[in-house]
Image (cartoon, rainbow, N blue to C red):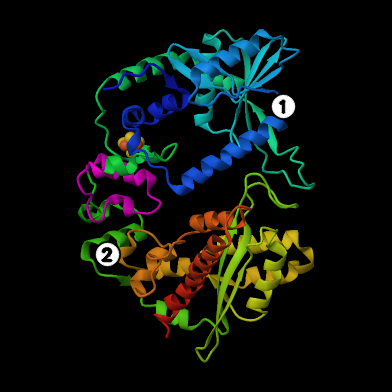
Amino acid sequence: MSAIRYLSKSRVQSGRQCHRRLWLEVHRRSSLAWSPQAQARLDAGSRFGELAQSLLGGGLLIDAGHQEANQALAQTAAALTRPASEVPRLFEPAFEHEGVRVRVDALERGPDGDRLVEVKSTTGVKEPYLWDCAIQTWVARGAGRPVRSVAIGHVDSRFVYRSEGDYRGLLAVTDITAQVEALVPLVADVVALLKQVVAGDEPAIATGAHCSTPYDCPFLDHCASQEPAPPAFPITVLPRAGKLLERLAALGYSDLTQVPDTLLDSELHRRIALVSRTGTPWTSGALPDLLASLPYPRHYLDFETVSFIIPRWLGTRPFQALPFQFSCHTEAADGSLQHTGFLDLSGAAPMADFVEAVLAAVGRVGPILVWNRGFEAGVLRRLAADFPRRATELEAAADRMIDLLPIYREHYYHPDQRGSWSIKAVLPTVAPDLDYGDLAVSDGQAAQLAYQEAIAPGTPPERHTELREQLERYCELDSLAMVQLVRHWAP
Ligand code: SF4
């Protein structure tokens, strides 16, 4: 087994989440697998971190790479020999104490001591951040720095991008000194324990809720592959069942088909258990009449949106869901179907054209059928606020939306859904010919990534065309899926 001499802040955090995760990070890095979505989140966070350096007021960057720890320590030590009046703020300074090495996002030197700032690309302070900062504070103090206060620099969700290139106000700085000071005395014992973990054999820890709390673990495939195959219907297929799952697990249940109804406390959970036991799909019997009563023309509508931590277009906010695509199938009383699509891959703000196109597609008459109304109606109402000239029509369109998801949840369940009413889970159970399986873009997150790749300046034209086709196929399938989910019961 290879010996390691140092832990990093992120490895201490990994070890706090799961000893096995830390051990694997040190000894089996080849089993680590970040999803493209997770990698994209890391990249976006890095871009926000770079912008935050200028928003904090600039400073001296310790530019040795993260693999060049000794060089970073030497650069930091050299910088700190200069007076604070010359170098009041350092970015990425490196410190080491008792075998733990950290890089601090920002260290501000003041007359009464240092302020340590940890930058996070989220909209507030979360519990794991306090530990991040406690570890850094413990190391920095151990290395001789007089850390007096600690803060989190995070995204201010109230920020609106008003002037090209001006992001002042995007970064909020929240003091967390008191919470961090409460944790600092605990760090030494945590570090000592984790050093023992690293020096030992791979911990025998089974997968469970801790694999995604507080962060998704990149070793999940590795660990799951070493465990016995789970039951066909594990208790985890029960939706919204956090505490119940803990109770069932404590009673020794892992297979839902073995759980007696008396231990399940909602009608929905009992239905899912019954269907899982019998393998027979369930419908309430009211579904055909309910769907047949929908008037014509019926507009089946699906949106795709993108959000940016650093707003890209004037008038937008961080994390705002901005629509760049829709697909609408309009069904007439005679059964004829007309498709309208919109996709803007120009890289310019797509919202204004989207508004005109979507209002033209859904007209003024007929229900607008969606899957998960909260999302689509929320996008339209946000657009109504941003485009007051079209607010009345947009609000009216939002009011016409009918959500197929709760209708299906109340009246239908198939064992293959495995506790999910996402359209991707329900569709194959009634229309096996329509399948998302062979699509290169097959969910909303993949659509966001495809969009961002398409609008990137360096994307070659052939790839741009390919991404357009993938996005069009995916979004069109989403609205066509809803047509099939209604026609199946009310042809
Ligand atoms: S997948 Fe779960 S059990 Fe395996 S290392 Fe990660 S957190 Fe630990």
Q: Where is the N terminus found, in terms of image quarters?
A: top left
Image height check: is 154 above or below 474?
above
- Tag 1 residue: 58
Name the residue located 39 percent from the left edge and 31 percent from the top edge: 17
Image height check: is 293 above or below 369?
below
Task: Please tell me whether mark 1 sits on a helix, a strand or a loop.
Answer: loop
Of residues 413 and 360, the one nearer the viewer is 360
On the image, the x and y values in percent for residue 352 come to 72, 64
Task: Please tell me whether mark 2 sits on a helix, a strand or a loop.
Answer: helix
Distance from disc 1 to disc 2, alpha carbons, whole Å, reads 60 Å
Q: Is mark 1 within 8 Å of ligand 1?
A: no
- Give the magenta-colored segment's residue range: 225-252
Left or right of 247? Residue 165 is right
Tag on residue 275? 2
Left or right of 136? Residue 190 is left
Q: In which quarter of the image is residue 339?
A: bottom right
Image height check: is 138 above or below 488?
above
Of residues 388 and 45, the one nearer the viewer is 45
Residue located farthest toward the bottom when viewing the structure as drawn: 334
Tag on residue 234? none
Image height check: is 313 above or below 433?
above
Name the residue located 48 percent from the left edge and 43 percent from the top edge: 39
Q: Where is the C terminus found, in terms of image quarters?
A: bottom left
